Image: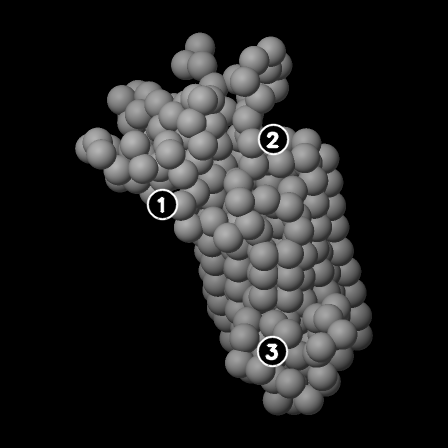
Amino acid sequence: MKIHPTAIISPTAQLADDIEVGPHVIIGGQARVGSGCTIQAHAVLEGKITLGNNNSVGYGAILGGAPQDFAYSPDIESEVIIGNNNRIREYVTIHRGTKAGTATKVGDRCFLMVGCHLGHNVEVADDVIITNNCLLAGHVQVGEGAVLGGGSIYHQFIRIGRRSMIAGGARLNKDIPPFTLGSFFNILNGINIVGLRRCGVDAATRTEIRRAFQLVFRSQKTVREAIAEARLSEWKPEALEFFDFIASSKRGCGSSRRSGQHLGDDSEG
């Protein structure tokens, strides 16, 4: 274990034998830090927090802080749970859950870039990229492999679907379905073709996802009518996931421009 002499570590913290801890780091008594982790200077781990294996925590990051919620009481025990092989860069903040027994969660292999914030009870799945200065309010859910563009803002309780991509500067208070491109204020710009190609989704499946998107968002049907029509046909699992996500939305989903798109066009090239 390599611990800088200026670090302040509670004797009750549970630390793996091979971690590295930089100058002026503070680690509280309920922290558990797994094998291979590196915690850089001035980072703080407080409250009940679990770091899995091989995580990197950047300078000045604060993980496990109390939630920004008037209903929260200091005697409530909640937590932050972070998986394995994540990169958490400088000045990231992750707040713990706001109700007893709840948690803010980050999966495996995520990349949280400089200055992003995860509010209480946020859930981030595996392989997510959250770029600089993104702000996620409480209870936001981010699906596997999603990419959130720099400076984008997320209202509480919304869902960002699997393998979606959000443009920098977007402001969202509606759900963004899986495999789509979100931008500006709840705009859906089509299908995330590049992202789907990169993760190995074949051309036939990409075409079917695009057809599902057009049925729901670029036909003259209401969303309810489009979903009902979709249920009458056979679809691949990805398209079914797309329809199920929309059908289960409590806040509603973003809407699509119907013509003149210049950002994130969903053509195959």
Q: Mark 1–mark 2 contact, CB under 8 Å?
A: no
Check the image and report above or below for 223 versus 41: above
What residue do we see at 35% from left, 37% from top? 227
**Frontmost residue, 107 versus 142:** 142
The location of residue 238, given as percent across then percent down, is 31, 37
Badge 3 density bin: few <14, some 14–19, many ≥20, Cα 10 Å: some
The spot of residue 161 in percent (x, y) is 47, 44
Crowding at label 1, few (<14), some or many (≥20) Cα neighbours within 10 Å? few
Side of 180 where 13 appears, left or right: right
User: Dividing the picture into quarters, in which one does residue 66 lie?
Assistant: bottom right
Q: Are marks 2 and 3 in contact (CB under 8 Å)?
A: no
* 155 horizontally vs 247: left or right: right
Evaluate whether residue 56 shows in this view.
no
The residue that disc 3 covers is 99
* Cα separation between marks 1 and 2: 20 Å
Tag 2 secondary structure? strand
**Count of numbered circles on the image:** 3
Q: Residue at x 58, y 82 (%)?
A: 100
Callout 2 amino acid: Ile
**Image coordinates for residue 223, horizontal then vertical, percent:** 44, 35
Q: Nearer the viewer, residue 92 or 238?
A: 238
Q: Residue at x 71, y 77 (%)?
A: 71
Residue tagged 2: 187
Q: Would residue 194 be found to the left or right of residue 56 on screen?
A: left
Q: Residue at x 55, y 71 (%)?
A: 103
> How packed is label 2: few (under 14 Cα within 10 Å), some, or many (20 or more)?
many
Q: If you read the primary sequence from the N terminus, does the residue marked by circle 2 or circle 3 appear first?
A: 3
* On-image quarter of the N terminus: bottom right
Which residue is label 1 attached to?
Answer: 244
User: Residue lying furthest left in this view?
Assistant: 234
Labels 3, 1: front one: 1
Nearer the camera: disc 2 or disc 3: 2
